Amino acid sequence: MESEKPMFQVENFDDEFVQKLVYDALVWCSLHGLVVGDKAYQKSGTVPGVGMTHAPIALLPTPFPESFFKQACEVAPLFNELVDRVSLDAKFIQDSLSRTKKADIFTSRLLDIHSKMLESNKKEDIRLGLHRSDYMLDEETKSLLQIEMNTISCSFPGFGRLVTELHQSLLRSHGDHLGLDSERVPKNTSTSQFADAMAKAWLEYNNPRAVVMVVVQPDERNMYDQHWLSSVLREKHNIVTIRKSLAQVEKEGSVQEDGTLIVDGQAVSVVYYRSGYTPRDYPSELEWDARLLIEQSSAVKCPSIAYHLAGTKKIQQELAKPGVLERFMDNKDDVTKLRKCFAGLWSLDDPEIIKKAIEKPELFVMKPQREGGGNNIYGDDVRENLLRFQKEGEEENAAYILMQRIFPKVSNVFLVREGVYHKDQAISELGIYGAYLRNKEKVIINEQSGYLMRTKVSSSDEGGVAAGFAVLDSIYLN
Ligand code: ADP
Ligand code: MG
Ligand code: MG
Protein backbone atom coordinates (compact mmCIF):
# COMPACT_ATOMS: atom_id res chain seq x y z
CA MET A 1 0.00 0.00 0.00
CA GLU A 2 2.70 2.43 0.97
CA SER A 3 6.24 2.24 -0.26
CA GLU A 4 8.72 3.18 2.40
CA LYS A 5 11.38 4.40 0.00
CA PRO A 6 11.01 8.06 -0.85
CA MET A 7 9.61 8.73 -4.32
CA PHE A 8 12.06 11.32 -5.40
CA GLN A 9 15.23 12.05 -3.60
CA VAL A 10 15.21 15.79 -3.30
CA GLU A 11 18.81 15.56 -2.04
CA ASN A 12 19.92 14.33 -5.43
CA PHE A 13 18.75 17.36 -7.38
CA ASP A 14 21.41 19.88 -8.22
CA ASP A 15 20.70 23.54 -7.74
CA GLU A 16 20.89 24.32 -11.44
CA PHE A 17 18.11 21.86 -12.26
CA VAL A 18 15.91 23.06 -9.40
CA GLN A 19 16.41 26.67 -10.52
CA LYS A 20 15.19 25.69 -13.96
CA LEU A 21 12.08 24.09 -12.49
CA VAL A 22 11.43 27.12 -10.31
CA TYR A 23 11.76 29.41 -13.33
CA ASP A 24 9.24 27.35 -15.33
CA ALA A 25 6.89 27.23 -12.34
CA LEU A 26 6.99 30.99 -11.88
CA VAL A 27 6.27 31.62 -15.55
CA TRP A 28 3.37 29.17 -15.40
CA CYS A 29 1.87 30.84 -12.30
CA SER A 30 2.10 34.27 -13.90
CA LEU A 31 0.51 33.16 -17.16
CA HIS A 32 -2.29 31.15 -15.55
CA GLY A 33 -3.42 33.40 -12.71
CA LEU A 34 -1.97 31.44 -9.81
CA VAL A 35 -1.27 34.77 -8.17
CA VAL A 36 -1.98 36.74 -5.00
CA GLY A 37 -1.69 40.40 -4.07
CA ASP A 38 1.86 41.39 -3.15
CA LYS A 39 1.93 42.94 0.31
CA ALA A 40 4.66 45.32 -0.81
CA TYR A 41 1.95 47.15 -2.78
CA GLN A 42 -0.61 48.97 -0.72
CA LYS A 43 -3.35 48.70 -3.33
CA SER A 44 -2.80 45.00 -4.04
CA GLY A 45 -5.71 43.97 -1.80
CA THR A 46 -8.24 46.30 -3.39
CA VAL A 47 -7.31 46.95 -7.02
CA PRO A 48 -7.09 43.85 -9.23
CA GLY A 49 -4.05 43.71 -11.49
CA VAL A 50 -1.95 45.92 -9.22
CA GLY A 51 0.93 44.39 -7.30
CA MET A 52 0.66 40.69 -8.04
CA THR A 53 3.03 37.93 -7.06
CA HIS A 54 2.88 34.16 -7.57
CA ALA A 55 1.06 32.20 -4.86
CA PRO A 56 3.32 30.35 -2.41
CA ILE A 57 3.74 26.84 -3.85
CA ALA A 58 5.43 23.53 -3.40
CA LEU A 59 7.64 23.00 -6.42
CA LEU A 60 6.63 19.36 -6.83
CA PRO A 61 3.53 17.40 -5.79
CA THR A 62 3.76 15.59 -2.48
CA PRO A 63 3.54 11.78 -2.49
CA PHE A 64 0.28 10.53 -0.97
CA PRO A 65 -1.01 6.95 -0.79
CA GLU A 66 -3.81 6.32 -3.26
CA SER A 67 -5.84 4.30 -0.77
CA PHE A 68 -6.02 7.21 1.67
CA PHE A 69 -6.87 9.65 -1.09
CA LYS A 70 -9.75 7.39 -2.11
CA GLN A 71 -10.88 7.12 1.49
CA ALA A 72 -10.94 10.90 1.87
CA CYS A 73 -12.87 11.33 -1.39
CA GLU A 74 -15.35 8.64 -0.45
CA VAL A 75 -16.36 10.25 2.84
CA ALA A 76 -16.84 13.71 1.31
CA PRO A 77 -20.54 13.20 0.46
CA LEU A 78 -21.07 11.70 3.91
CA PHE A 79 -19.61 14.76 5.60
CA ASN A 80 -21.77 16.97 3.36
CA GLU A 81 -24.82 15.07 4.47
CA LEU A 82 -23.75 15.17 8.10
CA VAL A 83 -23.42 18.97 8.04
CA ASP A 84 -26.87 19.24 6.52
CA ARG A 85 -28.42 16.93 9.12
CA VAL A 86 -26.70 18.68 12.02
CA SER A 87 -27.82 22.06 10.70
CA LEU A 88 -31.43 20.90 10.92
CA ASP A 89 -31.11 20.01 14.59
CA ALA A 90 -31.29 23.45 16.15
CA LYS A 91 -31.50 22.07 19.66
CA PHE A 92 -28.33 20.03 19.21
CA ILE A 93 -26.49 23.12 17.96
CA GLN A 94 -27.75 25.36 20.76
CA ASP A 95 -27.20 22.75 23.49
CA SER A 96 -23.72 21.76 22.30
CA LEU A 97 -22.62 25.37 22.21
CA SER A 98 -24.40 26.55 25.35
CA ARG A 99 -21.27 26.57 27.56
CA THR A 100 -19.09 27.87 24.74
CA LYS A 101 -21.53 30.72 24.31
CA LYS A 102 -20.72 32.02 27.79
CA ALA A 103 -16.98 31.91 27.19
CA ASP A 104 -16.75 33.08 23.60
CA ILE A 105 -18.43 36.27 22.48
CA PHE A 106 -18.05 35.54 18.75
CA THR A 107 -19.81 32.19 18.98
CA SER A 108 -22.39 33.86 21.17
CA ARG A 109 -23.16 36.44 18.50
CA LEU A 110 -23.55 33.74 15.85
CA LEU A 111 -25.85 31.80 18.16
CA ASP A 112 -27.96 34.91 18.71
CA ILE A 113 -28.59 35.13 14.97
CA HIS A 114 -29.36 31.41 14.93
CA SER A 115 -31.88 31.91 17.78
CA LYS A 116 -33.50 34.82 15.98
CA MET A 117 -34.00 32.67 12.89
CA LEU A 118 -35.59 29.97 15.04
CA GLU A 119 -37.93 32.45 16.68
CA SER A 120 -39.10 33.75 13.32
CA ASN A 121 -39.45 30.14 12.14
CA LYS A 122 -37.21 30.85 9.14
CA LYS A 123 -37.02 27.97 6.69
CA GLU A 124 -34.11 27.49 4.32
CA ASP A 125 -35.47 25.53 1.37
CA ILE A 126 -32.41 25.85 -0.85
CA ARG A 127 -29.33 24.74 1.05
CA LEU A 128 -25.89 25.20 -0.46
CA GLY A 129 -22.77 23.87 1.22
CA LEU A 130 -19.29 24.42 -0.20
CA HIS A 131 -17.09 22.71 2.33
CA ARG A 132 -13.52 21.54 2.75
CA SER A 133 -12.69 18.67 5.05
CA ASP A 134 -9.01 18.65 6.04
CA TYR A 135 -6.94 15.61 6.93
CA MET A 136 -3.50 14.60 8.01
CA LEU A 137 -2.05 11.15 7.66
CA ASP A 138 -0.94 10.05 11.10
CA GLU A 139 2.42 8.38 10.72
CA GLU A 140 2.20 6.44 13.97
CA THR A 141 -1.18 4.76 13.43
CA LYS A 142 -1.09 4.95 9.62
CA SER A 143 -4.54 6.42 9.54
CA LEU A 144 -6.23 9.30 7.81
CA LEU A 145 -7.49 11.65 10.51
CA GLN A 146 -9.70 14.67 10.08
CA ILE A 147 -8.23 17.96 11.28
CA GLU A 148 -11.44 19.90 10.84
CA MET A 149 -14.47 20.47 8.67
CA ASN A 150 -14.71 23.95 7.15
CA THR A 151 -18.20 25.10 6.27
CA ILE A 152 -17.53 28.80 5.74
CA SER A 153 -15.19 30.59 3.39
CA CYS A 154 -13.13 27.54 2.39
CA SER A 155 -10.12 28.94 0.69
CA PHE A 156 -8.51 27.94 -2.61
CA PRO A 157 -11.19 26.19 -4.64
CA GLY A 158 -9.82 28.41 -7.42
CA PHE A 159 -6.19 27.53 -6.83
CA GLY A 160 -6.67 23.83 -6.03
CA ARG A 161 -7.18 23.12 -9.71
CA LEU A 162 -4.41 25.52 -10.73
CA VAL A 163 -1.67 24.14 -8.52
CA THR A 164 -2.57 20.65 -9.72
CA GLU A 165 -2.27 21.78 -13.33
CA LEU A 166 1.01 23.52 -12.57
CA HIS A 167 2.47 20.29 -11.20
CA GLN A 168 1.11 18.26 -14.10
CA SER A 169 2.69 20.70 -16.51
CA LEU A 170 6.09 20.58 -14.75
CA LEU A 171 6.01 16.78 -14.74
CA ARG A 172 5.13 16.68 -18.42
CA SER A 173 8.19 18.82 -19.19
CA HIS A 174 10.63 17.42 -16.65
CA GLY A 175 9.08 14.10 -15.61
CA ASP A 176 11.72 12.00 -17.37
CA HIS A 177 14.52 13.67 -15.50
CA LEU A 178 12.55 13.45 -12.25
CA GLY A 179 11.40 9.90 -12.80
CA LEU A 180 7.80 11.00 -12.29
CA ASP A 181 4.64 10.48 -14.30
CA SER A 182 2.22 13.41 -14.62
CA GLU A 183 -0.66 10.94 -14.79
CA ARG A 184 -0.14 10.13 -11.12
CA VAL A 185 -1.28 13.62 -10.15
CA PRO A 186 -5.07 13.23 -9.92
CA LYS A 187 -7.29 15.53 -11.93
CA ASN A 188 -8.70 18.38 -9.92
CA THR A 189 -11.85 20.23 -10.96
CA SER A 190 -12.35 22.20 -7.74
CA THR A 191 -13.04 25.52 -9.49
CA SER A 192 -15.66 24.37 -11.95
CA GLN A 193 -17.37 22.12 -9.42
CA PHE A 194 -17.79 24.92 -6.87
CA ALA A 195 -18.87 27.37 -9.58
CA ASP A 196 -21.30 24.82 -11.04
CA ALA A 197 -22.83 24.27 -7.59
CA MET A 198 -23.32 28.01 -7.17
CA ALA A 199 -24.84 28.20 -10.66
CA LYS A 200 -27.27 25.39 -9.83
CA ALA A 201 -28.25 27.16 -6.60
CA TRP A 202 -28.82 30.31 -8.65
CA LEU A 203 -31.06 28.31 -11.02
CA GLU A 204 -33.06 26.88 -8.13
CA TYR A 205 -33.60 30.36 -6.78
CA ASN A 206 -35.10 31.11 -10.16
CA ASN A 207 -34.68 34.82 -10.68
CA PRO A 208 -32.86 35.32 -14.00
CA ARG A 209 -31.99 38.90 -13.13
CA ALA A 210 -30.45 38.08 -9.75
CA VAL A 211 -26.72 38.15 -9.09
CA VAL A 212 -24.36 36.10 -6.94
CA MET A 213 -22.85 38.17 -4.15
CA VAL A 214 -19.40 37.35 -2.82
CA VAL A 215 -19.05 38.76 0.69
CA VAL A 216 -15.43 39.87 0.88
CA GLN A 217 -13.00 41.38 3.30
CA PRO A 218 -12.37 45.03 2.40
CA ASP A 219 -8.68 44.34 1.81
CA GLU A 220 -8.18 40.92 0.23
CA ARG A 221 -4.86 39.86 -1.22
CA ASN A 222 -6.29 36.44 -1.96
CA MET A 223 -8.85 37.94 -4.35
CA TYR A 224 -7.75 36.00 -7.45
CA ASP A 225 -8.72 32.65 -5.95
CA GLN A 226 -12.20 34.13 -5.54
CA HIS A 227 -12.22 35.77 -8.97
CA TRP A 228 -11.64 32.37 -10.53
CA LEU A 229 -15.10 31.26 -9.35
CA SER A 230 -16.68 34.50 -10.54
CA SER A 231 -14.97 34.06 -13.88
CA VAL A 232 -16.42 30.57 -14.38
CA LEU A 233 -19.85 31.81 -13.29
CA ARG A 234 -19.68 34.57 -15.88
CA GLU A 235 -18.17 32.69 -18.79
CA LYS A 236 -19.76 29.28 -18.44
CA HIS A 237 -23.07 30.17 -16.79
CA ASN A 238 -23.59 33.79 -17.78
CA ILE A 239 -24.16 34.75 -14.13
CA VAL A 240 -23.07 38.11 -12.77
CA THR A 241 -21.13 38.32 -9.51
CA ILE A 242 -20.88 41.34 -7.25
CA ARG A 243 -18.35 41.74 -4.44
CA LYS A 244 -19.38 43.50 -1.24
CA SER A 245 -17.97 43.83 2.24
CA LEU A 246 -20.32 43.33 5.19
CA ALA A 247 -20.16 47.09 5.82
CA GLN A 248 -21.26 47.76 2.25
CA VAL A 249 -24.11 45.27 2.58
CA GLU A 250 -25.27 47.13 5.66
CA LYS A 251 -25.17 50.43 3.77
CA GLU A 252 -26.56 49.35 0.42
CA GLY A 253 -28.72 46.39 1.36
CA SER A 254 -32.35 45.81 2.23
CA VAL A 255 -34.82 42.95 2.30
CA GLN A 256 -38.07 43.34 0.42
CA GLU A 257 -41.40 42.14 1.74
CA ASP A 258 -41.20 38.91 -0.27
CA GLY A 259 -37.77 38.21 1.24
CA THR A 260 -35.67 39.29 -1.75
CA LEU A 261 -32.27 40.63 -0.77
CA ILE A 262 -31.44 43.80 -2.66
CA VAL A 263 -27.89 45.12 -2.59
CA ASP A 264 -26.83 48.17 -4.56
CA GLY A 265 -30.11 47.98 -6.48
CA GLN A 266 -29.67 44.35 -7.52
CA ALA A 267 -31.53 41.24 -6.40
CA VAL A 268 -29.15 38.69 -4.87
CA SER A 269 -29.89 34.98 -5.29
CA VAL A 270 -26.77 33.43 -3.75
CA VAL A 271 -24.57 34.87 -1.00
CA TYR A 272 -21.12 33.31 -0.97
CA TYR A 273 -19.12 34.23 2.12
CA ARG A 274 -15.37 34.72 1.80
CA SER A 275 -15.51 36.87 4.91
CA GLY A 276 -17.51 36.75 8.11
CA TYR A 277 -15.70 33.78 9.67
CA THR A 278 -13.53 35.67 12.16
CA PRO A 279 -14.28 38.35 14.78
CA ARG A 280 -12.01 40.66 12.78
CA ASP A 281 -14.65 40.68 10.04
CA TYR A 282 -17.07 42.35 12.47
CA PRO A 283 -15.26 45.48 13.68
CA SER A 284 -18.57 47.20 14.51
CA GLU A 285 -22.28 46.53 14.90
CA LEU A 286 -22.79 47.40 11.23
CA GLU A 287 -21.24 44.12 10.11
CA TRP A 288 -23.42 42.11 12.52
CA ASP A 289 -26.46 43.96 11.19
CA ALA A 290 -25.46 42.98 7.67
CA ARG A 291 -25.03 39.34 8.63
CA LEU A 292 -28.49 39.33 10.21
CA LEU A 293 -30.02 41.09 7.22
CA ILE A 294 -28.65 38.47 4.82
CA GLU A 295 -29.83 35.68 7.09
CA GLN A 296 -33.35 37.11 7.19
CA SER A 297 -33.56 37.26 3.40
CA SER A 298 -34.61 34.49 1.03
CA ALA A 299 -31.21 34.47 -0.71
CA VAL A 300 -29.34 31.16 -0.66
CA LYS A 301 -26.61 31.56 1.95
CA CYS A 302 -23.37 29.71 1.59
CA PRO A 303 -23.28 29.08 4.45
CA SER A 304 -26.44 29.69 6.39
CA ILE A 305 -25.91 30.48 10.06
CA ALA A 306 -26.76 26.86 10.91
CA TYR A 307 -24.20 25.49 8.42
CA HIS A 308 -21.64 27.92 9.81
CA LEU A 309 -22.24 26.74 13.38
CA ALA A 310 -22.27 23.08 12.32
CA GLY A 311 -18.64 23.60 11.25
CA THR A 312 -17.38 24.84 14.62
CA LYS A 313 -14.74 22.88 16.48
CA LYS A 314 -17.06 22.39 19.42
CA ILE A 315 -19.60 20.64 17.20
CA GLN A 316 -16.81 18.53 15.69
CA GLN A 317 -15.92 17.44 19.22
CA GLU A 318 -19.54 16.73 20.18
CA LEU A 319 -20.01 14.61 17.05
CA ALA A 320 -17.05 12.48 18.08
CA LYS A 321 -18.75 11.46 21.33
CA PRO A 322 -20.06 7.89 21.41
CA GLY A 323 -23.54 7.51 19.94
CA VAL A 324 -23.85 11.03 18.55
CA LEU A 325 -23.14 10.31 14.88
CA GLU A 326 -25.85 7.66 14.96
CA ARG A 327 -28.40 10.36 15.70
CA PHE A 328 -27.67 11.99 12.37
CA MET A 329 -26.70 9.21 9.99
CA ASP A 330 -29.05 6.26 9.39
CA ASN A 331 -26.64 3.93 7.64
CA LYS A 332 -24.29 1.99 9.95
CA ASP A 333 -21.56 1.67 7.31
CA ASP A 334 -21.61 5.43 6.82
CA VAL A 335 -21.22 5.96 10.55
CA THR A 336 -18.26 3.59 10.59
CA LYS A 337 -16.59 5.36 7.66
CA LEU A 338 -17.00 8.76 9.27
CA ARG A 339 -15.88 7.66 12.70
CA LYS A 340 -12.75 6.08 11.25
CA CYS A 341 -11.56 9.60 10.36
CA PHE A 342 -12.13 11.04 13.83
CA ALA A 343 -9.10 11.83 15.93
CA GLY A 344 -9.37 11.99 19.72
CA LEU A 345 -11.48 15.03 20.65
CA TRP A 346 -12.40 16.16 24.13
CA SER A 347 -14.20 18.88 25.97
CA LEU A 348 -12.24 20.67 28.70
CA ASP A 349 -14.65 19.58 31.41
CA ASP A 350 -13.22 16.05 31.31
CA PRO A 351 -10.83 15.87 34.34
CA GLU A 352 -9.12 12.69 33.20
CA ILE A 353 -8.06 14.07 29.84
CA ILE A 354 -7.03 17.38 31.42
CA LYS A 355 -4.69 15.47 33.71
CA LYS A 356 -3.19 13.63 30.75
CA ALA A 357 -2.79 16.81 28.76
CA ILE A 358 -1.01 18.54 31.63
CA GLU A 359 1.38 15.59 31.88
CA LYS A 360 2.00 15.29 28.15
CA PRO A 361 0.91 18.51 26.44
CA GLU A 362 2.93 17.67 23.33
CA LEU A 363 0.35 15.01 22.47
CA PHE A 364 -2.50 17.52 22.31
CA VAL A 365 -3.66 20.63 20.51
CA MET A 366 -5.93 23.11 22.23
CA LYS A 367 -8.35 24.82 19.86
CA PRO A 368 -10.62 27.83 20.26
CA GLN A 369 -13.72 28.39 18.09
CA ARG A 370 -11.78 30.25 15.43
CA GLU A 371 -11.01 29.92 11.73
CA GLY A 372 -8.25 31.03 9.45
CA GLY A 373 -5.16 29.57 11.12
CA GLY A 374 -2.86 30.87 13.83
CA ASN A 375 -5.26 30.41 16.75
CA ASN A 376 -4.35 27.04 18.26
CA ILE A 377 -2.34 26.38 21.40
CA TYR A 378 0.49 23.84 21.47
CA GLY A 379 3.07 22.31 23.78
CA ASP A 380 3.90 24.02 27.08
CA ASP A 381 1.23 26.65 26.43
CA VAL A 382 -1.37 23.88 26.60
CA ARG A 383 -0.15 22.94 30.07
CA GLU A 384 0.02 26.52 31.27
CA ASN A 385 -3.50 27.30 30.12
CA LEU A 386 -4.95 24.12 31.58
CA LEU A 387 -3.27 24.79 34.93
CA ARG A 388 -4.59 28.32 34.91
CA PHE A 389 -8.14 27.13 34.19
CA GLN A 390 -7.83 24.62 37.04
CA LYS A 391 -6.56 27.17 39.52
CA GLU A 392 -8.92 29.95 38.65
CA GLY A 393 -11.87 27.63 38.09
CA GLU A 394 -12.74 29.61 35.03
CA GLU A 395 -15.65 29.25 32.67
CA GLU A 396 -13.20 30.39 30.03
CA ASN A 397 -12.20 26.80 29.29
CA ALA A 398 -15.51 26.27 27.47
CA ALA A 399 -14.13 28.38 24.63
CA TYR A 400 -11.73 25.55 23.75
CA ILE A 401 -11.61 21.91 22.83
CA LEU A 402 -8.72 19.49 23.14
CA MET A 403 -7.61 17.38 20.23
CA GLN A 404 -5.18 14.55 19.83
CA ARG A 405 -2.09 15.86 18.11
CA ILE A 406 -1.52 14.21 14.76
CA PHE A 407 2.02 13.54 13.59
CA PRO A 408 2.30 13.24 9.82
CA LYS A 409 5.36 12.01 8.00
CA VAL A 410 8.10 14.59 7.59
CA SER A 411 9.75 14.81 4.17
CA ASN A 412 12.12 17.07 2.29
CA VAL A 413 10.40 19.43 -0.12
CA PHE A 414 11.06 22.56 -2.14
CA LEU A 415 8.89 25.48 -1.04
CA VAL A 416 8.74 28.48 -3.36
CA ARG A 417 7.90 31.92 -2.01
CA GLU A 418 8.50 35.32 -3.57
CA GLY A 419 10.45 33.79 -6.41
CA VAL A 420 12.93 31.95 -4.20
CA TYR A 421 13.03 28.28 -3.31
CA HIS A 422 13.94 26.75 0.04
CA LYS A 423 14.56 23.11 0.75
CA ASP A 424 12.89 22.23 4.02
CA GLN A 425 11.48 19.49 6.17
CA ALA A 426 7.75 19.62 5.73
CA ILE A 427 4.41 18.02 6.56
CA SER A 428 1.21 18.09 4.56
CA GLU A 429 -2.52 18.43 5.08
CA LEU A 430 -4.98 17.22 2.47
CA GLY A 431 -8.20 19.17 1.99
CA ILE A 432 -11.11 17.58 0.15
CA TYR A 433 -13.73 19.94 -1.21
CA GLY A 434 -17.36 18.94 -1.02
CA ALA A 435 -20.42 20.50 -2.63
CA TYR A 436 -23.97 19.96 -1.45
CA LEU A 437 -27.18 21.44 -2.82
CA ARG A 438 -30.69 20.61 -1.77
CA ASN A 439 -34.05 22.19 -2.52
CA LYS A 440 -36.62 21.02 0.01
CA GLU A 441 -36.42 17.21 -0.15
CA LYS A 442 -34.61 17.07 -3.49
CA VAL A 443 -30.84 16.57 -3.18
CA ILE A 444 -29.43 18.14 -6.34
CA ILE A 445 -25.70 17.84 -5.65
CA ASN A 446 -23.79 15.84 -3.11
CA GLU A 447 -20.26 15.19 -4.26
CA GLN A 448 -16.56 15.37 -3.66
CA SER A 449 -15.37 18.44 -5.57
CA GLY A 450 -11.65 18.40 -5.97
CA TYR A 451 -8.83 18.72 -3.48
CA LEU A 452 -6.04 20.88 -2.14
CA MET A 453 -2.85 19.82 -0.50
CA ARG A 454 -1.18 22.32 1.83
CA THR A 455 2.39 21.78 2.88
CA LYS A 456 4.25 23.58 5.66
CA VAL A 457 7.61 23.41 7.33
CA SER A 458 7.43 20.81 10.06
CA SER A 459 8.76 23.21 12.67
CA SER A 460 5.60 25.33 12.34
CA ASP A 461 2.61 24.24 14.41
CA GLU A 462 0.03 26.13 12.44
CA GLY A 463 -1.30 25.68 8.92
CA GLY A 464 -2.89 28.27 6.66
CA VAL A 465 -1.53 29.52 3.34
CA ALA A 466 -3.03 33.00 3.62
CA ALA A 467 -1.83 33.15 7.22
CA GLY A 468 1.70 32.64 5.85
CA PHE A 469 2.47 29.21 7.32
CA ALA A 470 1.88 26.88 4.41
CA VAL A 471 2.20 26.65 0.63
CA LEU A 472 -0.21 25.31 -1.99
CA ASP A 473 0.48 21.81 -3.16
CA SER A 474 -1.02 18.85 -5.03
CA ILE A 475 -0.53 15.13 -4.61
CA TYR A 476 1.41 12.40 -6.35
CA LEU A 477 -0.36 9.08 -5.87
CA ASN A 478 1.74 6.17 -4.73
P1 ADP B 1 -8.38 26.65 11.39
O1 ADP B 1 -9.86 26.60 11.32
O2 ADP B 1 -7.85 27.90 12.02
O3 ADP B 1 -7.74 26.33 10.08
P2 ADP B 1 -7.38 24.06 12.23
O4 ADP B 1 -8.12 23.11 13.11
O5 ADP B 1 -7.32 23.68 10.80
O6 ADP B 1 -7.99 25.50 12.44
O7 ADP B 1 -5.92 24.23 12.79
C1 ADP B 1 -4.96 25.04 12.13
C2 ADP B 1 -3.72 24.23 11.78
O8 ADP B 1 -3.18 23.65 12.98
C3 ADP B 1 -3.98 23.06 10.84
O9 ADP B 1 -3.93 23.45 9.50
C4 ADP B 1 -2.85 22.12 11.22
O10 ADP B 1 -1.66 22.49 10.56
C5 ADP B 1 -2.67 22.37 12.70
N1 ADP B 1 -3.44 21.37 13.48
C6 ADP B 1 -4.74 21.46 13.83
N2 ADP B 1 -5.14 20.39 14.52
C7 ADP B 1 -4.08 19.58 14.60
C8 ADP B 1 -3.84 18.29 15.20
N3 ADP B 1 -4.81 17.65 15.85
N4 ADP B 1 -2.60 17.76 15.10
C9 ADP B 1 -1.62 18.43 14.44
N5 ADP B 1 -1.77 19.63 13.87
C10 ADP B 1 -2.98 20.21 13.94
MG1 MG C 1 -11.03 26.03 9.65
MG1 MG D 1 -7.83 24.56 9.08
Image: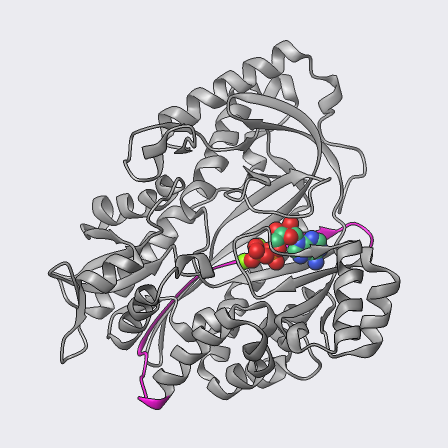
**What percent of the width, then of the height, locates residue 2?**
76, 44
Q: In this view, does 23 lie to the left or right of 335?
A: left
Is residue 121 part of the magenta span, yes or no?
yes
Q: In this view, does 314 lie to the left or right of 410?
A: left
Residue shown at the point (68%, 84%) measured from the top left:
323
Residue nearest the viewer, comparing 130 with 256: 256
Q: Give the range drawn in magenta.
A: 119-141
Is residue 416 part of the magenta span, yes or no?
no
Residue nearest the viewer, comparing 99 with 67: 99
Q: Can you tell which quarter of the image residue 104 is in?
A: bottom right
Residue nearest the viewer, comparing 198 with 344: 344
Q: Which residue lies furthest to the top in this view?
A: 16
**What percent of the width, then of the height, locates residue 9?**
74, 24
Query: Eyeballing the image, is 290 above or below 459?
Result: below
Query: Can residue 359 be seen?
Result: yes
Quadrant assignment for the C terminus: top right
**What percent of the width, then of the height, locates residue 74?**
57, 61
Residue nearest the viewer, comparing 200 with 83: 83
Residue shown at the point (59%, 36%) measured from the top left:
184
**What percent of the width, then of the height, locates residue 294?**
28, 70
